[in-house]
C-alpha cells in the first residue's frame, strides 16, 4: 500500500478514481468514453451543472457570484485577476507570503501599480505577516491562503476595505470560508478538488466591467460567465473528476466535517515532529499549515536514510521542495488519517534505530 503525501497533483479518493476510470471506457451507459463525448451534449452539460451546483452548496456561495471552471491553472489567474480588476491607472495591494504570491504580484505589474504591503521573505517565508495596513485606494488586496512550499497558512482572513482576491489552490474546500468576504477566489484543482487541468474561479459579478482596457475574449471573466465556462471546449475530464470529488466531499458531510478531520491529522503529525528528537518544525506555530506540514532533521546527514526507509514503507512524496529542502507531508482532504499514522510509525521506527 502507498501513502501519498505528494504536494500536487495530490491524492484523490479511491472511489473517485474508480468511477473516473469506468467513465473513460463507458460514460453513464452511453457506450462512449467521457474523453470523446461532445462538451455540448446533454450528458456533459449535466456534469458541469452539477459541479457548479456542488461548489455553490459546499461553499455556501451567495447570490451575485459566478462559478467558473477554466483552463490554464492558477498561474494564469495571476494575470487574469489584474487584467480584469486592475485599472491601468490604479494600484493593487499584495501580501507576499511565498513563491506563488511573489509570482502573482509580478504578473500584476504588467497591468498597473503593485504595492507589496507586507512580506515574510526576510525569514524565508516561515511566518505570515500580521501588522500591515491595506490601502483603501487599492483596486483589490491579493492574498495566498496556504503556502505549499513553506508550510504556512492564513488561519484567519484579514478584514479589508477593498475587495479581497485569494489564491486558495492548496486549501480549497479544506475548511469553511465566508465567500462573501472575497471578491475573487481562484484555485487550481489538483490539490483538493480534482486532477490538474482545470481551475475553479468564484468571482463577484459587480467587480467586472470596470477596467479601461480591452480584454481578449478568452481572458475576460465576463465572456466566460456568459459562455457558462464553455466559451471554448472545457477540460471535460478534469471537470468530471472534480464533480466526483465534490460529491465525495458532500457525502462525507461537507466542508465542516473535513475541516475537523484535517485539524486532527495536522495536530497528531505536528505533535510527533515536536516529540521526536530527530525532527523539528520550521514555521511559526500560529501560522502552521493544516495542508502542508514542513519539517527538517536535527542532523541533515540522516535525511537520505530516512527517505529510503519511507520508500520501503510505502510513504511517498514527503521530500521537501527543492528550494527549501527537508520534508513536506501534504495531508490533503483525501489522505486518510491512517496514512498519517503510518508516517508517524516510520518516524518513530527511524528514531529508535538512530539513538
Image (cartoon, rainbow, N blue to C red):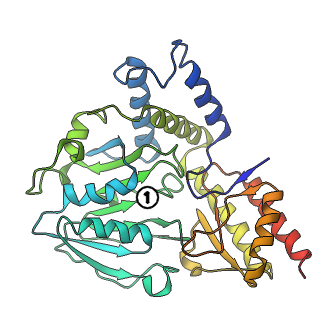
Please state, as top left, top right, bottom left or bottom right, where the C terminus lies in the image: bottom right
Q: Position of residue 117 (x, y in %)?
A: 30, 80
Q: Secondary structure at mark 1?
A: loop
- Locate residue 305: give its quadrant: bottom right
Q: Is residue 268 above or below residue 96?
A: above
Q: Nearer the viewer, residue 279 or 134?
A: 279
Q: Is residue 296 left or right of residue 116?
A: right
Q: Which residue is mark 1?
A: 168
Q: Position of residue 216 (x, y in %)?
A: 17, 46
- What residue appears at the point 32 percent right and 60 percent down from the top-left corner? 78
- What residue appears at the point 80 percent right and 78 percent down from the top-left corner? 276
Q: Is residue 290 left or right of residue 233?
A: right
- Locate residue 353: give its quadrant: bottom right
Q: Is residue 12 left or right of residue 186?
A: right
Q: Is residue 310 above or below residue 301?
A: above
Q: Position of residue 209 (x, y in %)?
A: 13, 50
Q: Nearer the viewer, residue 297 or 208?
A: 297
Identity of the residue furthest to the bottom in this view: 122
Q: Position of residue 335 (x, y in %)?
A: 67, 51
Label tally: 1
Q: Nearer the viewer, residue 287 or 187?
A: 187
Q: Is residue 16 above or below residue 178?
A: above
Q: Is residue 202 visible?
A: yes
Amino acid at each position: 500500500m502507498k501513502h501519498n503525501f505528494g504536494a500536487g497533483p495530490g491524492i484523490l479518493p479511491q472511489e473517485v478514481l474508480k468511477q473516473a476510470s469506468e467513465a473513460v471506457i463507458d460514460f453513464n451507459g452511453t457506450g462512449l468514453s467521457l474523453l470523446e463525448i461532445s462538451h455540448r451534449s446533454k450528458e456533459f452539460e449535466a456534469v458541469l451543472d452539477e459541479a457548479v451546483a456542488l461548489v455553490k452548496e459546499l461553499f455556501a456561495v451567495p447570490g451575485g457570484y459566478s462559478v467558473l471552471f477554466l483552463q490554464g491553472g492558477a498561474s494564469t489567474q495571476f494575470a487574469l485577476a489584474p487584467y480584469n480588476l486592475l485599472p491601468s491607472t490604479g494600484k493593487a495591494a499584495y501580501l507576499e507570503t511565498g513563491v506563488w504570491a511573489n509570482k502573482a504580484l509580478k504578473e500584476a505589474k504588467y497591468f498597473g501599480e503593485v504595492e507589496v504591503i507586507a512580506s515574510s521573505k526576510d525569514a524565508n517565508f516561515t511566518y505570515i505577516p500580521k501588522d500591515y495596513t491595506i490601502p483603501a485606494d487599492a483596486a483589490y488586496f491579493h492574498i495566498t491562503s496556504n503556502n505549499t512550499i513553506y508550510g504556512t497558512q492564513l488561519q484567519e482572513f484579514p478584514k479589508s476595505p477593498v475587495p479581497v482576491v485569494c489564491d486558495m489552490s492548496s486549501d480549497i474546500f479544506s475548511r469553511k470560508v465566508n465567500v462573501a468576504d472575497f471578491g475573487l477566489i481562484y484555485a487550481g484543482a489538483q490539490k483538493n478538488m480534482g486532477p490538474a487541468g482545470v481551475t475553479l474561479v468564484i468571482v463577484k459579478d459587480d467587480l467586472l466591467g470596470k477596467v479601461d482596457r480591452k480584454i481578449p475574449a478568452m481572458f475576460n471573466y465576463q465572456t466566460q460567465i456568459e459562455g457558462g465556462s464553455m466559451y471554448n471546449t472545457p477540460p471535460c475530464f478534469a471537470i468530471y473528476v472534480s464533480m466526483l470529488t465534490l460529491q465525495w466531499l458532500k457525502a462525507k458531510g461537507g466542508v465542516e466535517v473535513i475541516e475537523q478531520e484535517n485539524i486532527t491529522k495536522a495536530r497528531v503529525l505536528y505533535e510527533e515532529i515536536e516529540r521526536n528528537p530527530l525532527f523539528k518544525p520550521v514555521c511559526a506555530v500560529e501560522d502552521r499549515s493544516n495542508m502542508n506540514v514542513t519539517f527538517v532533521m536535527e542532523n541533515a546527514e540522516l535525511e537520505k536514510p530516512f527517505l529510503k526507509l519511507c520508500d520501503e514503507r510505502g510513504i511517498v512524496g514527503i521530500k521537501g521542495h527543492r528550494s527549501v529542502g527537508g520534508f513536506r507531508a501534504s495531508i490533503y482532504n483525501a489522505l486518510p488519517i491512517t496514512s498519517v499514522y503510518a508516517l508517524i510509525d516510520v518516524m518513530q521506527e527511524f528514531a529508535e534505530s538512530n539513538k
